């Protein structure tokens, strides 16, 4: 089983990974979401669900083919963390 | 009270407007979301919440200052409808 990276929580069976990202204002949330979209294109992997409002974005990642998240999802989640770290916290 | 445009449902008090948009594939969902983001920038108004996955996007619009949606939100929702109409259906 692949352990989710920092800040992500494994939920359900098979597990999906969940993390809530918060931002100071809408423009930062928007930048983050644009970054996630670009990352999805680059890595050919997109979250199962994204829910966002003015100052937060909740992201859920599932594994492919109803398997649990693996190395590809780990790489993706780490890059998402890096995106958030360059922008706002926590 | 402003009546929501076609396809939108008024929910709650004060009412927010909700509509689910469905698409044939992720690329169409992505195009739609990019369009909504551009529209938000153009009109200076963004949805209270957007929840999206591979082939759908659920959008919730609230009025400003905890009022019910008005003319600005109506104009926004109509433009969102137009965006969806130029892409996929229903």
Image (cartoon, coloured by chain):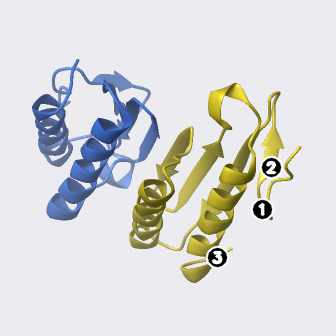
Chain colours: A blue, B yellow
Judging depth in this view, the residue of B69 and A83 nearest the camera is B69
Secondary structure under tag 3 reads: loop
Q: Would you place residue A5 above or below residue B33 in this image?
A: above
Give the class, few, some or many, for how many residues have Cα within 10 Å of label 3's Cα (few <14, many ≥20): few
Q: Please identify the quadrant where the N terminus of chain B is shown.
A: top right
Q: Which mark is residue B9?
A: 2
Residue B84 x/y as whole percent? 59, 72
3D distance between C-alphas at marks 3 and 2: 18 Å
Q: Position of residue B50 (x, y in %)?
A: 52, 45
**Mark 3 or mark 2, which has the lower sequence index?**
2
Residue B35 lies left or right of residue A8; in this view the side is: right
Q: Name the chain letter of the residue that bears numbered label 1.
A: B
Q: Nearer the viewer, residue A53 or B22?
A: A53
**Earlier residue among tags 3 and 1:** 1
Question: Quadrant where the C terminus of chain B lies?
Answer: bottom right
Quarter residue B49 falls in: top right
Q: Is residue A80 above or below residue B25?
A: above
Asked if badge 3 and badge 2 are on a common chain, one would say yes
Q: Residue at x 25, y 42 (%)?
A: A32
Q: Residues within 10 Å of mark 2 (few under 14, many from 20)?
A: some
- Using the rendered image of the protein, determine whether residue B9 is visible from the camera's viewpoint: yes
Q: Where does label 3 land, which residue?
A: B89
Determine which of the numbered discs, if any, sits on residue B7 in the image.
Answer: 1
Whether labels 2 and 1 share one chain = yes
Question: Alpha carbon of mark 2 to alpha carbon of mark 1: how far?
Answer: 7 Å
Q: Quadrant of residue A40?
A: bottom left
Q: In the displayed structure, would residue A19 be above or below residue A45? A: above
């Amino acid at each position: 089983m692949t352990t989710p990276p920092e800040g992500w929580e494994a939920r359900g069976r098979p597990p999906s990974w969940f993390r809530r990202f918060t931002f100071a204002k809408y423009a930062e949330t928007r930048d983050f979401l644009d970054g996630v979209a670009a990352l999805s294109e680059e890595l050919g992997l997109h979250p199962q669900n994204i829910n966002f409002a003015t100052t937060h974005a909740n992201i859920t990642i599932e594994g492919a083919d109803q398997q649990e998240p693996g190395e590809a999802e780990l790489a993706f989640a780490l890059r998402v963390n890096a995106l958030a770290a360059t922008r706002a916290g926590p």
